[in-house]
Image (tube, rainbow, N blue to C red):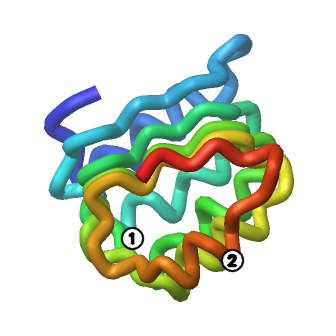
Amino acid sequence: IRNLNDETIKGLIEEIQDVEGLVSLNLSENRNVGNKGLRFLPMLSQISHLNISACCLNDYGIDPIIKMGNLRALDLSYCTRLTDQSIKKVGEMRRLRELNLRGVPKITHATIKKIERRDLVLHL
């Protein structure tokens, strides 16, 4: 889905929240979607695969993502404003099986080591 912003994403999520069988959502490269718009994502409790790469997300906006208990795959690539603080929180998501962190320059090697586990595939 392209050309979204913080205002339009709320309406989109409200429209699709009851769609049966919806398990994947790709919001990549919507650079006008940030913390304000992404706070509505937990309304999509059925989503297991979420791509929010290259969105305008920072550490303050990660908490709603953490609340998405069914997530198995999360793409945060090129969310360049994320830091170790938010990635440590993501690492606590025990159902998560795949995490893409390519192009996230503020993450340290120590944080990567901290979130590594056998059942989590990391893309760096």
Disc on res. 58:
none
Location of mark 1 (residue) = 35
- In front of the other: 21 or 123: 123
Q: Residue furthest top?
A: 21
Q: Which amino acid does label 1 sit on?
A: Asn
Using the rendered image of the protein, determine whether residue 58 is visible from the camera's viewpoint: yes
Label 1 crowding class (10 Å Cα cut-off): few <14, some 14-19, many 20+? Answer: some
Location of mark 2 (residue) = 114
Q: Is residue 115 above or below residue 53?
A: below
User: Marks 2/1: CA distance?
Assistant: 25 Å
Q: Where is residue 28 in the image (x, y as percent from the top left)?
A: 30, 39
Name the secondary structure under disc 2: helix
Upstream in the sequence, badge 2 or badge 1?
1
Quadrant that contains the N terminus: top left
Using the rendered image of the protein, determine whether residue 7 is visible from the camera's viewpoint: no
Q: Position of residue 34 (x, y in %)?
A: 31, 65
Write the residue at 84% across / 56% down. Answer: 94
Q: Position of residue 44 (x, y in %)?
A: 65, 40
Q: Which amino acid does label 2 sit on?
A: Lys
Side (left or right) of 70 relative to 15: right
